[in-house]
């Protein structure tokens, strides 16, 4: 299950860079790439894609005007060298705004946000969290490299001051210089739940819950009072009790 997208920029070199970034993610599926916004408009009138990556300043039709012209636009990520367009872009409900030159880590952050939005939408529409919990992956930066982690591999994520430690089912840990709040914002909320101010847990990996702790992969993690009701509700929604029919 890849995320379909369209790439649009009047600079072929930018398109080449985006194609290279896309190849590194293994999450996006480029359905088309254009340097002419009119060609992109014609394509979008007859084909569906989930995400549009579009430059803002282009001849004939700007990226902003292109989005306005679409009755049902896909998720939109705008790209430009001019930050003054950001406010206008967000007024059109674009989900992200990438300033050129676009770095790999910033592009990957946008991809993580896209994946989170789409997964949340699937959870809300289908209610089948069991299927969705193992789908997809995300990137973290650690030790001067980008590492891909699959959601199903993650047991829990722990805050360590400015760092976070990601604990996986195979016993490995990964340290990254991003705080827990920022990571939480990029992860699918239907798949991860905060159990404590210092812990974020993969709901598909929870083995047991008591008043004071959550057991995940054999680890006993604290369950804060502030988060207890939300965690309990999440567990009940996944339990057989919810599925039983009255006699």
Image (cartoon, rainbow, N blue to C red):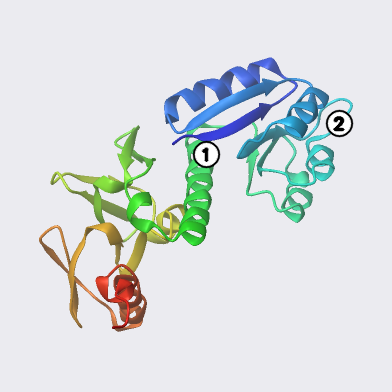
- Furthest toward the left, the residue is 218
Q: Look at the image and tell me in which quarter the C terminus lies.
A: bottom left
| Element carrying mark 1 | helix
77 displayed left or right of 45 = left
The residue depicted at 10 percent of the width and 60 percent of the height is: 218
Say above or below: 218 vs 1.
below
Q: Which residue is drawn at 32% across and 35% down?
A: 147
Residue 180, horizontal then vertical, whole percent: 37, 59
Q: Which dot, 2 or 1, sits closer to the camera? A: 2
**Which of the 4 image quarters holds residue 198?**
bottom left
Q: Is residue 66 above or below residue 16?
A: below
In whole angstroms, how far apart are the C-alphas of marks 2 and 1?
Answer: 26 Å
- Determine contact: label 2, label 1, CB under 8 Å: no
Measured as percent of width and height from the top left, residue 238 is found at 31, 67
**What is the x, y in percent for residue 153?**
24, 46
Q: x%, y% of residue 37?
A: 79, 27
Q: How crowded is mark 2: few (under 14 residues within 10 Å), some or many (20 or more)?
A: some
- Disc marking residue 74: none
Dividing the image into 4 quarters, which one contains the N terminus? top left
Q: Which residue was labeled with disc 1?
A: 106
**Foreground residue among 114 and 89:** 114
Q: Check disc 2 and report the residue beneath it.
A: 61
Asked if residue 118 can be seen in this view, the reply is yes
| Number of disc labels | 2
Q: Residue at x 71, y 53 (%)?
A: 93
Q: Is residue 56 left or right of residue 29?
A: right
> Is 135 displayed left or right of 87 in the figure?
left
State which quadrant residue 244 falls in: bottom left
């Amino acid at each position: 299950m890849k995320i379909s997208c369209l790439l649009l920029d009047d600079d072929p070199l930018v398109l080449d860079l985006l194609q290279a970034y896309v190849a590194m993610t293994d999450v996006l599926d480029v359905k088309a790439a254009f340097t002419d916004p009119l060609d992109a408009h014609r394509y979008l009138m007859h084909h569906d894609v989930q995400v549009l990556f579009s430059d803002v300043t282009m001849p004939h039709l700007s990226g902003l005007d292109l989005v306005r012209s679409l009755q049902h636009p896909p998720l939109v990520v705008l790209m430009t060298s001019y930050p003054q367009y950001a406010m206008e872009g967000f007024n059109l409900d674009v989900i992200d705004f990438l300033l050129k030159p676009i770095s790999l880590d910033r592009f990957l952050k946008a991809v993580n946000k896209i994946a989170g939005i789409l997964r949340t939408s699937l959870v809300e529409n289908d209610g089948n969290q069991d299927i969705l919990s193992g789908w997809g992956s995300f990137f973290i930066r650690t030790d001067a490299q980008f590492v891909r982690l699959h959601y199903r591999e993650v047991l829990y994520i722990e805050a360590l001051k400015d760092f976070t430690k990601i604990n996986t089912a195979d016993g490995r840990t990964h340290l990254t210089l991003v705080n827990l709040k920022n990571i939480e914002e990029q992860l699918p909320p239907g798949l991860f739940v905060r159990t404590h101010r210092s812990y974020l847990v993969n709901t598909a990996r929870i083995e047991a819950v008591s008043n004071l702790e959550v057991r995940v992969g054999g680890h006993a993690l604290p369950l804060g009072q502030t988060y207890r009701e939300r965690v309990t509700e999440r567990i009940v929604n996944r339990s057989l009790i919810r599925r039983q029919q009255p006699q």
